[in-house]
Image (cartoon, grey):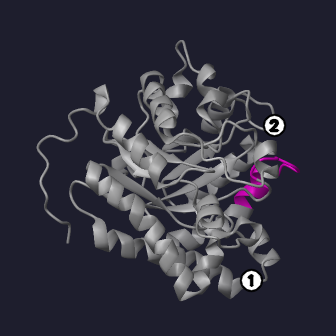
Amino acid sequence: MKHSQMKADLPQLEGKVFLTDGGLETTMIFHEGIDLPLFAACEMLKTEAEREILKNYFRSYTEIAAQLKTGIVLETATWRASRDWMEKLGHNDQSIRRINLDAVALLKEIREEYETIETPVVISGNLGPRGDGYDPGEIMTEVVAEAYHSEQVGFFKEAGVDLVSAITLTNVPEAVGFVRAAQKAELPVVVAFTVETDGRLPTGQSLGDAILEVDRATGNGPAYYMINCAHPTHFEQIFGGENAWAGRIKGLRANASCMSHEELDNAEELDDGDPVALAGQYRELMDVLPGLSVLGGCCGTDHRHVAAIGGACVHSHHHEDQLEGKSDVRVA
C-alpha cells in the first residue's frame, strides 16, 4: 500500500468537519475525581467501573458529532501506554500489549453503537511522547525514536486502528522516528506538535520549520499535522502570508486556558476558560487554515467546549454544503 493511498483512505481528509474529544485526563481528574497516576488514563481500562466511565466519556463526544452530523475521530486512551511509562506503573510485556489492544476494542464498541453514513467514526491509535509532554528533555535520535514507538504502533496495527497519531510531541527527531515506525507498519499517521506561548516548539524551533523538516525526512509521511496543548492566543500570530506548510495543518486540539505549560503544570485547580470564546477563536482560525477539519480540545476542555466549537465551525463557509443531501441510514 502506497502512503498516498493510505492517506486517501481517511475520510477526515475529504472536506467534512470531524470532531474529536477534549482533555481526557483533565476531565477524569477534575470532573470525575479519578486519580490518574502519571496522567495515565489507560489505567482506567483495568476495572469494569472505570472502563464504563471511559465509554461514557467517548459516547458524549460521539453524540455531539451525531447531532451536528459531523464525523468523529476517536483517540484511544493510550497517550501514556508506551513501554517506559507503563513499566513505571508496574506493567509487564503481556499487560502493556493487552491494555493497548483493549483501548482499541473499547472504541470499536462505540463505533458499533453510533456510526452512521452521516457520522463516520475513525479510530486513531494514540501515542504520547516518550518523555514529558511539555519538556523535550533528552531528545532521542530518529533511529532510537523509531525503535521505541514501533512497539506501540505494532499493537495498534494488530488491533486494527484506522490511523496512528502522536500527540503533544515537542521535537522533530521523535516525530520523524514515529512517522517512520508508522510507515513500516503501513498505517496512516498524524503528528500533533505542541507549542509554547510564542508559537514555537519547546525546543525553540518554529512550527513551520518543524513541519517542513519532518516532511523532508519522511517523504511527506504524515497524512496531516495537528497543533495541541496550547491556546489559540499562543499560535494564531504565526499564520499569514503564503506558507505552504500551514496547509499541512488539518487538526486542532487547543487548551481551554491561556496559561503557559509551566503554569498549567503547577495549577491546583482546573482553568476551563470560556467555551464560547474558544469556539470563536477556532472559527477565526479556519479562515487562515482552510484545511482545518479535525476539531477537538486538550487540557481543560470537555464536551461543552467541543459542542461549542462544532456549532461555530460546522457551518463555516467552506463546509456549509456538508449538511445537505445526507440520509439517516445506519451503517451495519
Give, as a three-letter code, the residue at label 1.
His
Q: Position of residue 5 (x, y in %)?
A: 38, 49
Q: Position of residue 96 (x, y in %)?
A: 67, 80
Give, as a three-letter code, the residue at label 2.
Thr
Q: Which residue is mark 1?
A: 91
Q: Position of residue 195 (x, y in %)?
A: 70, 36
Considering the numbered disc 1 on the image, is that residue within a helix, a strand or a loop?
loop
| 93 over 260 or under it: above or below | below
Q: Residue furthest right?
A: 138
One can see residue 159 in this view: no
| 153 over 109 or under it: above or below | above
**Residue 290 or residue 144, whichever sits in front:** 290
**Residue 160 or residue 50, whichever sits in front:** 50
Q: Which residue is mark 2?
A: 203
Q: Is residue 284 magenta?
A: no
- Residue range in magenta is 133-147
Cβ–Cβ under 8 Å for marks 1 and 2: no
One can see residue 60 in this view: yes
Q: Quadrant of residue 310?
A: top left
| 155 over 174 or under it: above or below | below
User: What residue is drawn where x is 20% and y is 66%?
Assistant: 331
Q: CA distance from mark 1 to mark 2?
A: 31 Å
User: What residue is drawn where x is 67% and y is 52%?
Assistant: 270
Q: Position of residue 39 (x, y in %)?
A: 71, 65
Considering the numbered disc 2 on the image, is that residue within a helix, a strand or a loop?
loop
Q: Is residue 136 magenta?
A: yes
Along the polypeptide, which appears first: circle 1 or circle 2?
1
**Residue 19 or residue 259, whichever sits in front:** 259
Magenta residues, dominant SS class: loop
